Image: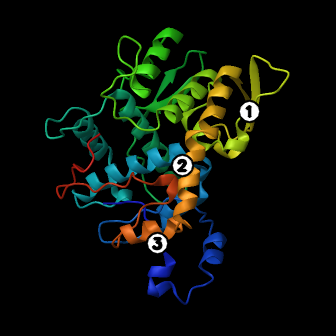
Amino acid sequence: MLAARRVAGDRVPVLAEREDLAVREDRVGIHPGDPILLSSDCRIDEVLSHYLCRSSFARLAQETKRNYTDDYCLFFDFLWGRGKWWSEASPDDLWDFEDWRTRSPRNPRRVGGARWNRGLAALARLYEWAVQREYVLANPVLMRTVTGRTGKVVLVPTARAKNARTSEVRWLTPRAFRRWVDVGLRGHGADGLPDSGWAGRLADRNAAFADLLFSSGVRLGEGASLLTLEVPRLHLEGGRYYAGRLARVVTKSRRARTFYASSVVVGEVKGYVESSRARAVRRAQAVGPVRRAADAAGDARDGWASPPASLAGRGRRGGSDGSGRGDGG
């Protein structure tokens, strides 16, 4: 099993005399949020660490790095069950992994073509890098040439699924979206009136957030990163749309960009900030100083800590037979 891990220095005595740990990490190219992979016997592979922190992998978007790290964990678990290290993988191992991942009845959470292709792309990137630097003798991801849509000949993995669906997009009309918000987030019934049995919380916050995404077209992570001072503000002179700015560190393209939200949505967000959110802030202030998040999280953990915040919640443990049954999906 390999999983990302974060170590809290104030609770690990062995780090007490290593005040220069941050300097050492920076010297070798390890940065906050970088994944670290541990084998089942708690060893760190120097080559894998170099790949994760110093190769083109380090420049990928955080979500891509998190997804690829999951894919590496699953394949390495599979190899571990066969008594192999990641650098000993063969094409036969990959084909057997593909069978287990996509078709085997032994895997209760088989995946479709698109998910398999994503993992295959992750493995192809890793092993191509390792072959170029002679860390492995041969690439277990066999490649073949195909002619692309533009007529250009490109290399693609031989095991690439042909039945992949690139997306699960379901189009909604504005009217259908409004119905979804009213029923799913505000707790209204089919008649359009509030449902007396609704037990949801923070309906105005959730509805304002959904409307902001719908109106502006920003991604989920981009919208969730916005501070109240970054949300467009209404102006006395009025206007149908108001401009906001996304910082480059939160965008998928790593480029800052402008977004536009309708005046109705901006007013909805403003109403939430000045009502429900303001009441919640006052209640929290009345209770007293809020404990540091790190302390609160530390009390809840018992030994193994979560991965870095940007990679949290995705480390998995495979089955003892190497099947990775901890996450078949």
Counting residues from the start of the chain, the first of labels 3 and 1 encountered is 3
Above or below, 252 against 114 in this view is below
Q: Are marks 1 and 2 in contact (CB under 8 Å)?
A: no
The spot of residue 186 in percent (x, y) is 44, 26
Disc on res. 280:
2
The picture quadrant where one finds residue 142 is: top left
Amino acid at circle 2: Ala
The crowd level at tag 2 (other Cα within 10 Å; few <14, some 14-19, many 20+) is few
Colouring convention used in this rendered image of the protein? rainbow
In 3D space, how far apart are the residues under numbered discs 3 and 1 (Cα atoms)? 39 Å
Q: Is residue 57 visible?
A: yes
Disc on res. 232:
1
Q: Nearer the viewer, residue 231 or 88?
A: 231
Counting residues from the start of the chain, the first of labels 1 and 2 encountered is 1
The picture quadrant where one finds residue 105 is: top left
The spot of residue 162 in percent (x, y) is 37, 22
What residue sits 55% from the left and 61% below the top?
A: 286
Disc on res. 6:
none
The crowd level at tag 1 (other Cα within 10 Å; few <14, some 14-19, many 20+) is many
Residue picked out by circle 3: 7
What residue sits 51% from the left and 28% below the top?
A: 207
Residue projecting furthest to the right: 237
Amino acid at circle 3: Val
Amino acid at circle 1: Pro
What residue sits 35% from the left and 17% below the top?
A: 189
The spot of residue 236 in percent (x, y) is 83, 25
Front: mark 1 or 2: 2
Front: mark 3 or 2: 2
The crowd level at tag 3 (other Cα within 10 Å; few <14, some 14-19, many 20+) is some
Q: Say left or right for 110 vs 154.
A: left
